[in-house]
Structures are given as C-alpha cells and as structure tokens.
Amino acid sequence: MESAKCQLKGKNTYGAILTFVFAADCYKKTSSKEAITCLEHAVNVLIHIGSIGRAARYYQDIGELYESEQNLERAVDYFERAADLFQSEELILFVHECKEKVAQVAAQLEQYQKATEIYEEIALYYLQEGLKFAPRKRLLHAGLCQVSKELDPTFSETHECRFLKDLADAIDKVDAVKLSDAVKEFTDITPLDSWEATLLLRVKKKLEAMELGNEYLR
C-alpha cells in the first residue's frame, strides 16, 4: 500500500489504483479489514478522476467482503453506495444487481419492509420493460418478505415456502412437468383445496401452451 501512496505523490494515478487493487486482492486471503482499506483508497482515487463505474464496482466488492464477515449492516451500506454510483452512470442492470443484494441482506436483518419495496421496484421495472419472466422471482421474494414481516417469521423454512419456490422455478423455466412434480410432492403431504387446484391447473395449462409455442418456433 505504501507503494501506491508513493505513486500518487508522483502523479502516477492509474498505477496507484492498480497497486491498491492488487494489494486488496492479496489481503482478501488473510485480512478482509486490510482489503477493504485498500479498496477504499482505490475508490477515492477513482471518484476523484471521474471513473465512477469502476468505483461502484469496488464498493460492491467491499459490500461482499463485509457480507462474508457477517457485518451485514456495513454490507447494506456499501451495496447501497454502489447502487447509487451505478445509478449516476445509468448502469441499470448493475443498479438492480446491487439493490437485490441490499434486499437480500436487509431480509437477513429482518428489515422486511425495505426488502419488499426493493424487490417490488425491480419487478415493476422488468414488467415495464416487457420482460415476462424476470419479475417473477422478485415478486416471490417480495411476497416471502411480506409474509415474514406480517405473518410468520418461520415461513421461509416451511413445506409451503419450498412449494412456492418450486412453482416459481417451474414457471421461470416454462416446464409443466416440473410444475406437476412440485404439486405432487406437495400434495403427498398437504392436500390442495378446490380453489388451489383450479388455479394450479390454469397455470399448468398455460405452461403447456407456452411449451407448444416454443416447440413450434424451433
């Protein structure tokens, strides 16, 4: 790190950035704290020279380091910083990537309302962009957060929650067989009522129709 500081004094800005990042990569194996310090130095220089996208990426790296250390509050802080910088550069996919990390960690901190709002925001964006499948996992996650907040904090560990996840996976993959398997596995333990069975049958028929359409296009 001293080498990088000397490079800065000698106006070798890009050399200093590379040295800070290289030092961070080395420290990641032994000391997350030192790695974070190096990345902070790199970010400060990058912001100073206007390289905002790279600065955001290193903020994201810092967030991941804090997450690996189970310092979840600091992880949220840095994922939010990264999202803000990516937003200033209009790098929307990276914004969503960081915001999803914020939501994920916020849910671990039992900040369910915050997590729900982020998942819904991202799902709405995908819907407005005309993407059919991308919103579904986010809406599922939003629903799980809302359930955890309002009803049952143990829901994420239940048979019903696993069933929801399996359904979402089948829909994402447009796989009617996978959906049928999920329903069978669930009903081996818990029978469906007529309302649930009717809705799931509709979903299955839609998936089968979509599969036929995909087959026709091949």
Image (tube, rainbow, N blue to C red):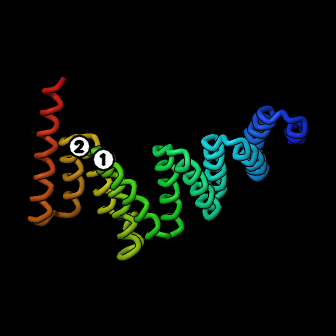
Task: From the top left corner, tell me how far across and down residue 92 is, in percent.
Answer: 46, 46
Instruction: Determine whether, in the image, residue 86 is placed left or right of residue 19.
Output: left
Q: From the viewer's perspective, is the residue at label 2 or at label 1 nearer?
A: 1
For the C terminus, the image quarter is top left
Alpha carbon distance from label 2 to label 1: 8 Å
Front residue of this view, candidates 70 and 51: 51
Q: Secondary structure at mark 1?
A: helix
Q: Which mark is residue 216?
A: none
Asked if residue 76 can be seen in this view, the reply is yes
Q: How many residues crowd around disc 2 within 10 Å: few (fewer than 14), some, or many (20 or more)?
A: some
- The three-letter code of the residue at mark 1 reads Asp
Residue that mark 1 sits on: 169
Residue 4 occupies quadrant: top right
Asked whether 48 or 110 is in front, the reply is 48
The reply to whether callout 2 and callout 1 are in contact (CB within 8 Å) is yes
Q: Residue at x 11, y 53 (%)?
A: 201
In the depicted structure, whether residue 35 falls above or below residue 76: above
Q: How many marks?
A: 2
Q: Is residue 27 left or right of residue 85?
A: right
Q: Is residue 29 visible?
A: no
The residue under label 2 is which amino acid type? Lys
Q: Circle 2 is placed at which residue position? A: 178
- Residue 38: x and y in percent read 78, 46
Q: Tell me: 2 left or right of 52.
A: right
Taking the image as shown, residue 176 lies to the left or right of residue 164, namely left
Image vertical order of residue 144 relative to residue 166, above or below: below
Q: Quadrant of the N terminus?
A: top right
Give the vertical position of 176 relative to 80 (above or below): above
Q: Depth check: give the residue in front, 28 or 12.
A: 12
Mark 2 / mark 1, whichever is N-terminal: 1
Q: Secondary structure at mark 2?
A: helix
